[in-house]
Image (cartoon, grey):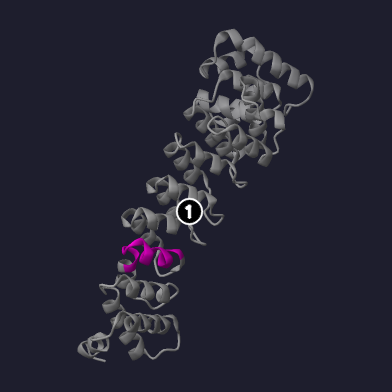
Amino acid sequence: MAEGNLQNLLVGKDDDARAVIAQRVGERLCLDDVPEAEQRAAQALARHLVADAVERVRGALSQAVKTAAYLPRDVALKIAHDVDAVACPFLQATEIFSEDDWKQLVLTISRGARVAVATRSSLSEGVTVVLAEVGDSVAAQALIENPAAPMTQPVCDTLIDRFEEAGWVLDTLAKRDDLFADTAARLLSKVSSSARAQLTKAYGLSASVAILSDDAEAAAMLKLIRNVQPPRLPQFIQHLRDRKLFSYALMLAALRDGSLDFFEAALSDLARLPLARVRHVIDFGNDGILTGLLSRAGIPQDVYAEFWDELTRLRGDKKLRV
């Protein structure tokens, strides 16, 4: 059908009639068995309808094409950048965009539209990270409350860094039950007492850990350290250092708690030595060799004896690999 004939289909039609046409166009673009000529005609009509002056007509098109597989990309982009009443229902459901499209869209759509994207039933890590980077607190909360949004380390780190002063956002994050242990460690000192209780419960911590005190903070940290798998320890230690939660006292407390993997990983990080070398020194080194390692790691000299005594005890209890 010629372009002029397509335009004639809309000439003289009132708002209700154009809304009905928009619905029928959407139905055509959702079907797989429509002849190619009809599909092209429907796509051409969609290009006219997406520019209609009446919001209700554009809204009817948005609703009708939100699951369409044959919607032209240019039409989809116009809908995505329309007013929220038109854009949001479409953005919540459409699968027409690629991963790169979504990343670009999140940067250019309205604040309300970002919230709609944050509630989608499918979200990749890449898109979730961008939403965490540019969305406001409402979008962040919607993202956190969406079980389909992957709360990976990059996503959580971005949310914690951006919304450290927005306690309600981090309280919501603390209620997720799929966080990494190092994320939980970062949240402990940043959330309300009720959110802390939820966080400690989700990670199997005792109720007493939720008390806001230095001793409780250390107890909570030690329990989190036990839950971190050895391959994740370097990243976990870096997070502790970034948030000023790492200390030599924590290293000694972890050693006394039996968290040898954490102690070794911390020494490896501080001394800038391979983990295998650190383990060999801890397993077989005498007090002089160990002192050299502690010195290289920057540990104060006045606590050398405490570290050596604890390692000696573990060796005597046969808890080391000797």
Give the amino acid at mark 1.
Answer: Glu
Is residue 30 left or right of 3 when viewed as pictured? right
Instruction: Say whether residue 174 is left or right of residue 87.
Output: right
Residue lying at 70% horizontally and 17% vertically, measured from the top left: 310
Determine the residue positioned at 63% across, 24% down: 218
At x 39% / y 66%, what residue is drawn? 97
- The percent coordinates of residue 83 (x first, y second) are 32, 62
Residue 222 coordinates in the image, percent (x, y) = 65, 28
Magenta stretch contains residue 83:
yes
Q: What percent of the width, then of the height, locates residue 252? A: 64, 19
Question: Would you identify the image quadrant in which residue 91 lies?
Answer: bottom left
The residue wearing badge 1 is 125
* Quadrant assignment, res 230: top right
Q: Quadrant of the N terminus?
A: bottom left
Q: Is residue 12 above or below residue 105?
A: below
Q: Nearer the viewer, residue 201 or 156?
A: 201
Looking at this rendering, what residue extends furthest in the top direction?
302
Magenta span: predominant SS is: helix
The x and y percentages for residue 186 are 54, 33
In the rendered structure, which segment of residues is drawn in magenta?
A: 79-92
Q: Farthest residue in the left direction?
A: 4
Residue at image position (40%, 65%) is 98
Secondary structure beneath label 1: helix
